[in-house]
Amino acid sequence: MILTTTSGLISLLFLSILLTCTTPAFGETARALVYTATAGFRHDSIPTAIQALQTRGSAVNLAFQNTEDKGVFTDQGLEGYDVVIFLSTTGEVLDDTGNTAFQNYLNNGGNFVGIHSASDTLNTTAFYGKELGDFQNATIVVLDASHPSTENLPTDWPVRDEMYNFKSDPRSVGAIVILTVDESSYTDDGTRRFNQGEPHPIAWYQEHGAGVVSGGTAGRSFYTSLGHLNETWEDELFMNHILSGIQWTLQANTTRAFNSSALVGNGGTSSSASASSSASASPSSTSSTSGTASAS
């Protein structure tokens, strides 16, 4: 999906929220691969985001391992993870081998989470688009408060972040939009050349697991377009949104931490991924996920 970024402001609430812990069925800690490779614009909030996830991981029985090595994306390299997270990735960050292995992982029940510019990634890869689907103060509006990632958010949530526009409507590939933005609360001077659907999508999920939706991949996917700034990743309300979204994907029960007969995930597998993290920046700016983004 391609996104378009619009300058938008976000003023985040500083609330402490007790996270509901999803405990894997077999006593295994669920393993999450956090992929932060960039082939375009690089967000300086990536190190802050990694630290925020790893600091909170034990509280929700999740082990976050960070890598920027596309060589991890092989069948063996991915099979030990219960969820793969693309965190502020940009551009074509996988080669053909990696794309094939990633698709195999998803088809075998692996779960996926995309954060922020994950929607500006793998724009030439068809299956990825289907899987997802300057700053201003803006008001995020909760459309569905029953989802774990939104149930602790206020109905009208003041934020300070980029507001993305998308080149396609995530609902066209079966996504359920759970957050939108009050478009009267910020200024968007750009020309919108694409149909992203109404209301304006900000966060969404796809329920492919547990036989709920026919077709697609076996696991679940969750995406939020928020997460540009360092201060965002220091906000407990936002972190509850992220961690609850990740936990929801795991509840598909399609990985080994929750299902002993699953094909992928933590639980008796010997495969592991490198936990390397590169902080070098790529000084170019792009924008675009199952909705591709462009900046306005």
Image (cartoon, rainbow, N blue to C red):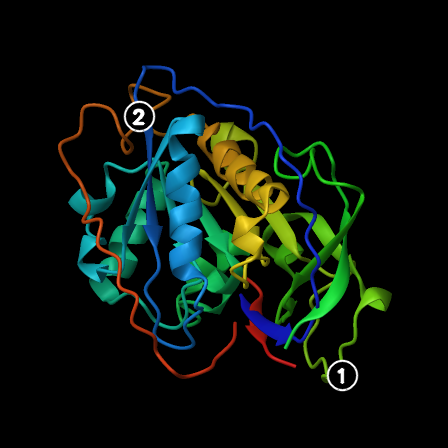
The residue positioned 18% from the left and 23% from the top of the image is 268
Q: Quick one: label 2, few (<14), some, or many (20+) residues within 10 Å?
A: many
Quadrant, the C terminus? bottom right
Q: Position of residue 161 (x, y in %)?
A: 64, 64
Q: Position of residue 43 (x, y in %)?
A: 45, 69
Location of residue 192 with respect to 225 vertically, above or below: below
Nearest to the observer: residue 282 or residue 131: 282
Quarter where residue 255 is shown:
top left
Q: Quadrant of residue 19?
A: top right
Q: Amino acid at mark 2?
A: Arg
Whether residue 111 is visible here, answered yes or no, is no
For label 1, the SS is loop
Q: Which residue is found at the position 57% from the left and 55% from the top?
A: 232
The location of residue 155, given as percent across then percent down, is 80, 43
Q: Earlier in the sequence, mark 2 or mark 1?
A: 1
Q: Which residue is mark 1?
A: 189
- Above-or-below relation of 260 to 69: above
For mark 2, what is the residue? 256
